[in-house]
Amino acid sequence: MLTVIVITKNEESRIKACLESVKFADEIIVCDNGSEDNTIRIAEKYTDKIFQTRLQDFAEIRNFATEKASGEWMLFVDADERVTEALRSEIETMISFSDFSAYALSRKNIVFGQEVKYGPFWPDWVIRVLKRTDFQMWVGKVHEMPHFSGKLGYSKNSLLHLTHRGVDQFMKKVLDWSAIEARLRLDANHPKMTKWRFVRIFITELLNQGFKRRGFFGGTVGIIDSFLQTFHLYITYVRLWEMQQPKSLTQTYDDLDQQLIDDNFKY
C-alpha cells in the first residue's frame, strides 16, 4: 500500500495538477499549514484525509503528516512537483520488489519556464520514497532530510519540479525562508554583522552561484537565478542584522514617533 503525502500552504494554483499526478496512490494525505485561499477546497475533491496545522518548520510538518499515514510505503510530493507517468510506473515497481528502505528521486527543474540542468539543478536528488517501518524522522527546519535505517536506492526516472515561477513567487519564498534561515544563524550565535561582512558575503555568494554552481554558464535563466539566489542569501543576512540589534526597528520607529510628539515635532 502506498501513501502519498503532500504539504500545502496557499497552493490553489498548483495543487490540482499535483494531486492529479498522484491519483494512483492507495491513500493521499494533504497536510495544510495555514492556507488562506482555496487549496483545501480543491484538495477535498481528491481526498478526505486533510489535516491542518500551524507548525514552525518543515521537518515538524512532515513528521506530523507521517503519523497520519497507513501505507507500507510513503511518497512525499510538494505541491509544485509532478509525478510523471514513467516515474509512477517505476515507483509501483519499487514498492513491490525492493530490498531498499528508501529511494532518492532526481528532479527535472523548470526554472522561469525553462528546464535547466546546470549545477544544483541536475540531478537534484531528493529522498522522497520511504518504507514506513524503517523510517525514523525528518530533521531540519529548512532543507529537511529524512532519517531511516536500511539501504538507499536511486530512481531512473524523475519528479518534475515547477519552481521559480516568476519574480513575485520567488520573492515571496525569499521573505518566508530568509526569516527562518536568519533565526537559525542567530540561534547559532553567528558573529555580529558588519558592513565589510555584508560586502564579503555578497561577492562570495555571487561567485559561488555564478561559477561554482555554474549559473553563469546556464544561459539567461542561469544568470537571472544566480543574482536572485545571491539576493536571497543577502536578505537572510539583512534579517540577521536586524535580529542582532539591541532594539527592534519597530520599537525604534515607535520611540521616534513618541519623541516627536513629546517635543512638539522639533527635530
Image (tube, grey):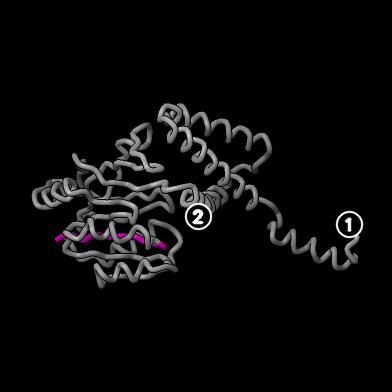
Q: Residue at x 19, y 61 (%)?
A: 23
Image spot of residue 223 (x, y percent)? 47, 33
Please give the label number shown on residue 267. Answer: 1
Tag 1: residue type? Tyr
Range of magenta residues: 1-10
Q: Nearer the viewer, residue 238 or 157?
A: 157
Left or right, residue 95 beside residue 53: left
Q: Residue at x 13, y 52 (%)?
A: 92
Q: Which residue is mark 2?
A: 176
Quadrant of res 199: top right
- Look at the picture and state if 71 lies above or below 212: below
Q: Residue at x 28, y 62 (%)?
A: 66
Q: Say which quadrant the N terminus sits in.
A: bottom left
- Residue 58 included in the magenta stretch of the image: no
Image spot of residue 194 (x, y percent)? 67, 39
Tag 2: residue type? Asp
